């Protein structure tokens, strides 16, 4: 299966966990560490197909970009109010406006899919849950082709600690390592 195949499986599990946490908890944002931008784009596509996008609340409704949707408030016996949820990518190729949408969200709750870009130096507000695939994409020189290539690798112990530390900066948090 290799790391790339394992990465796809772990990313799918991470995505399912993020959606479940969002639906089963009352507050806090979810930060999901994915190996690379392609994995993030697949996660965004899956979420886009699963939830009804709110065109009035969505600024970046394009493939590979974030979007918003309403969750809850279905009426009937349930008295829960509808909340606005943002699904956002966070990686090195985003424009400043797209980065600001993650760092200062307009939504009530947010799921942020990120690479190791969010490991250090940037704090996403109100993250209570971190889901970590334990993988990253790394550049490596291939001596056979004389070219750089991106490979999927397990993260280091220091990266594990950094990613875990992203949960619960403001209040208690939970880190799920896959």
Image (cartoon, rainbow, N blue to C red):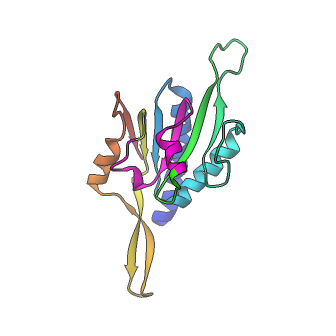
Judged from this view, the residue extending furthest toward the left is 158
Q: Quadrant location of residue 146?
A: bottom left
Which residue appears at 69% of the width and 11% of the height?
77
Q: Is residue 141 magenta?
A: no
Judged from this view, the residue extending furthest toward the front is 97
Q: Is residue 109 magenta?
A: yes
Which residue appears at 41% of the width and 57% of the height?
135
Q: Nearer the viewer, residue 142 or 61?
A: 61
Q: Which residues are magenta?
A: 97-123
Which residue appears at 57% of the width and 29% of the height?
23
Placement of 24 over or under 78, stated as above or below? below
The image shows residue 101 at horizontal and vertical percentages of 53, 43
Which residue appears at 68% of the width and 38% of the height?
51
Placement of 160 over or under 167, stated as above or below? below
Q: Nearer the viewer, residue 55 or 178?
A: 55
The image shows residue 89 at horizontal and vertical percentages of 53, 49
User: Is residue 169 shown left or right of residue 32?
Assistant: left
User: Is residue 51 shown left or right of residue 158?
Assistant: right
């Amino acid at each position: 299966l290799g790391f790339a195949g394992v990465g796809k499986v772990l990313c799918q599990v991470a995505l399912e966990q993020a959606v479940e946490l969002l639906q089963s908890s009352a507050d806090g944002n979810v930060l999901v560490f994915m190996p690379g931008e392609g994995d993030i784009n697949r996660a965004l596509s899956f979420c886009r197909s699963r939830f009804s996008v709110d065109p009035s609340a969505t600024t970046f409704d394009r493939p590979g970009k974030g979007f918003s949707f309403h969750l809850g408030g279905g009426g009937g016996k349930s008295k829960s109010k509808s909340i606005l949820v943002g699904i956002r990518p966070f990686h090195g190729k985003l424009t400043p406006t797209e980065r600001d949408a993650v760092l200062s969200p307009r939504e009530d709750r947010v799921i942020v899919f990120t690479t190791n870009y969010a490991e250090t130096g940037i704090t996403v507000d109100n993250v209570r849950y971190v889901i970590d695939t334990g993988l990253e994409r790394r550049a490596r020189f291939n001596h056979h082709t004389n070219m750089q290539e991106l490979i999927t690798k397990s993260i280091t112990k220091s990266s594990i600690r950094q990613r875990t530390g992203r949960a619960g900066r403001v209040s208690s948090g939970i880190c799920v390592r896959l």
